[in-house]
Amino acid sequence: LTGLPTRMGAAAVPAKPDSKTGAYAEQFLATGMTVLGKTTLPEFGFNATTEPAHAEPTRNPHNLLYSTGGSSGGSAALVASGAVPLAHANDGGGSIRIPAACCGLIGLKPTRGRHRIAEHVRALPINMLSEGVVSRSVRDTAVFHAEMEKIYRNPKLPPIGQVEGPGKRRLRIGLMIDSVGDRRTDTPTREAIEKTARLLQQSGHHVEPVRPPVKESFPEDFKLYWAFLAFMVEQGGKQAFGRDFQAERLDGLSKGLSQHYRRNFFRSPAALARLKRVRHEYRRFFSNYDAILSPVLGHTTPRIGYLSPDLPFETLFHRLTDYVTFPPYYNIAGAPAITLPAAWTDEGLPIGAHLGADIGNERLLLELAFELEGMDR
């Protein structure tokens, strides 16, 4: 936004006011949104918790000892605490859906290109980023996307329109409890998703177990692309953010990811080629199914500190890849996916359910989310 600094959650980035408002921000503001301020995020959105190394952590309103998720953790905390009804969030690997799951909110990651695209992601080999909001109700998320569509509608995608309740069509839903490579989901999360599946079956949907719609190579390929983005920040920070950018002030996760890329850069051509095929592999899945039901995360929300960027990099990297097991498929495919509350842990923390659909099918997801929101769970 013009006149406000954008530091990407990083101490390395100077706090200089922006000289212009970006294309996506213009669309967002054109809906009549009021800007109250900026919220917290982890450095460059690379982490799945909002605990910047240079500042206090953002705490979960449901239990202050626990994470809000990330990267849109500041937005999720404000919405979950009741400070605002909805807040901007964006998603490059789960950053709308993860905080929504941790904080008991609705978080829709729209199809890639659904809204105007921010300038800084246009040059990426694969644009993983989608913009949206986190909210406390399916209604508010549905209204937001309908209003955004009045400002700009991508002619290559089917319109969402105003979704006001459940759909009438009964769906074929694939149930995916464990992630690619048979990475097993923890028991409380597993039970919450199995209960959601039973509710959908009882309401007439056909639900059956499925394998993930991506190849076994996906986790390693995604990790390398994630590391490539950190490498580009470290090496190109002065060009992107100005001569005052200080690479030495990057946190341990950003530096560790960049080093991981340096050690493995020779794998990039093959990894990128495989990632670019994910969209086609994902779409083939929907010749037999209408939606996918899965957990959002591999286990329940961790305590503050469990994913701290101050941890040794290999420890943190391992923990993150065991935690963020489902959302990245949808970013690489450019497909829509939504998080909504499914259950609660003994510590008083929400567990999120995750629904994905074919390219451009946000309307189906919102209808299904309305249906689940209205069920007695």
Image (cartoon, rainbow, N blue to C red):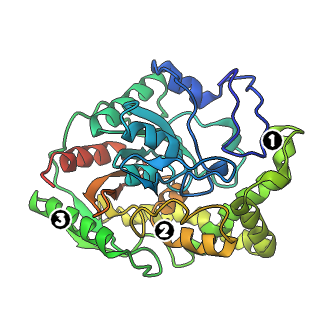
Residue 114 visible: no
Relative to residue 205, is residue 348 drawn left or right?
right
The residue depicted at 65 percent of the width and 47 percent of the height is 55
Quadrant into which the C terminus falls: bottom left
Residue 233: give x, y in percent of width and height: 77, 52
How many other residues sit within 10 Å of disc 3, few (<14), some (14-19) or many (≥20)? Answer: some
Q: Which residue is labeled 1 in the image?
A: 240
Label 2, residues with CA under 10 Å away: few <14, some 14-19, many ≥20: many
Q: CA distance from mark 2 to mark 1?
A: 30 Å
In the image, 93 versus 85, the foreground residue is 85
- Tell me, yes or no, whether the two marked residues, 2 and 3, touch with CB atoms within 8 Å: no
**Amino acid type for the residue under numbered disc 1:** Ala
In the picture shown, does residue 311 fall above or below 361? below
Residue 53 shown left or right of residue 296 in the figure: right
Front of the two marks 2 and 3: 2
Q: Is tag 3's residue or tag 1's residue first in the polypeptide sequence?
A: 3
Residue at numbered disc 2: 323
Q: Nearer the viewer, mark 3 or mark 1?
A: 1
Badge nearest the viewer, 2 or 1:
2
Report which residue position mark 3 lands on: 206
Q: Amino acid at mark 3?
A: His
Residue at x-position 71% and y-position 38%: 7
Disc 2 residue type? Tyr
